[in-house]
Amino acid sequence: MVYIKKYKNYIFIPFLIKAFYIFATLEIKIQTMELSHIEHIGIAVKSIDEARKYYEDVLGLKCYAIEEVKEQKVKTAFFKIGQTKIELLESTDPEGPVGKFIEKKGEGIHHIAFATKNIEKVLQTLDADGVNLIDKAPRKGAEGLDIAFIHPKSTFGVLTEICEDKNQK
Ligand code: CMX
């Protein structure tokens, strides 16, 4: 009884240590992700020539680049608004990812892309968390960015891209 009285003020110490550990590891996880902003939103369209009229003539944005990404079987058109871009995606092959998407779901938002300054670290963190990565290592995407996709089954239905512009350093 004497011991219980003497040490009763210390019985919370293990719980405090555990709580501190949980917060510390959470903080580290948040810091290591280092996503800075929405780099672009990818929008699947049947025809860039048709869709760009809306972005240019109605919304008043300027298309500053058109590029074909052969490996992904798409043609892309870029518009900038603030720090973020709109990427129109037109399939060059019905069997490509955008062709299949339009066939199944129609035109619309195809993916969201987050920018980071350390894509390898982000992919490592996601992989360690059991997230389903389509690309375990970065590859080259439009505008020379290093990119990697996360499967929509792991992201509540939104195809997600991580990108890093290694030329910006
Ligand atoms: N958003 C949400 N869900 C999507 C999706 C998308 N963009 N694309 C496919 N899906 C879903 C399908 O609806 C399907 O769901 P269900 O199983 O519930 O029916 C599932 O994913 C599988 O789809 P699928 O048509 O059978 O296609 P695949 O499995 O062959 O491929 C995916 C799906 C996501 C792995 C593939 O599209 C991919 O690798 N995408 C990443 C690359 C890409 O999209 N590149 C184009 C962009 C170019 C660029 O910006 O550089």
Image (cartoon, helix red, strand yellow):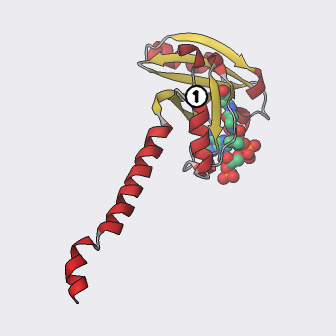
**In this orientation, which residue lies closer to the viewer: 56 or 15?**
15
Q: Amino acid at mark 1?
A: Cys
> Which quadrant of the figure contains the N terminus?
bottom left
Name which quarter of the figure residue 99 lies in: top right
The residue singled out by tag 1 in the image is: 163
Q: Would residue 93 be visible to someone looking at this image?
A: yes
Name which quarter of the figure residue 66 lies in: top right
Above or below, 30 against 23 in this view is: above
**In this orientation, which residue lies closer to the viewer: 31 or 100?**
31
Residue at 50%, 21% (x, y): give it.
Answer: 85
Label 1 secondary element:
strand
Above or below, 58 against 18 in this view is: above
Q: Would residue 110 be visible to someone looking at this image?
A: no
Residue at 49%, 38% (x, y): give it.
Answer: 33
Coordinates of residue 89 in the picture (x, y in percent): 64, 25
Number of residues whose C-alpha sits closer than 10 Å to that of mark 1, classed few (under 14), some (14–19) or many (20 or more): many
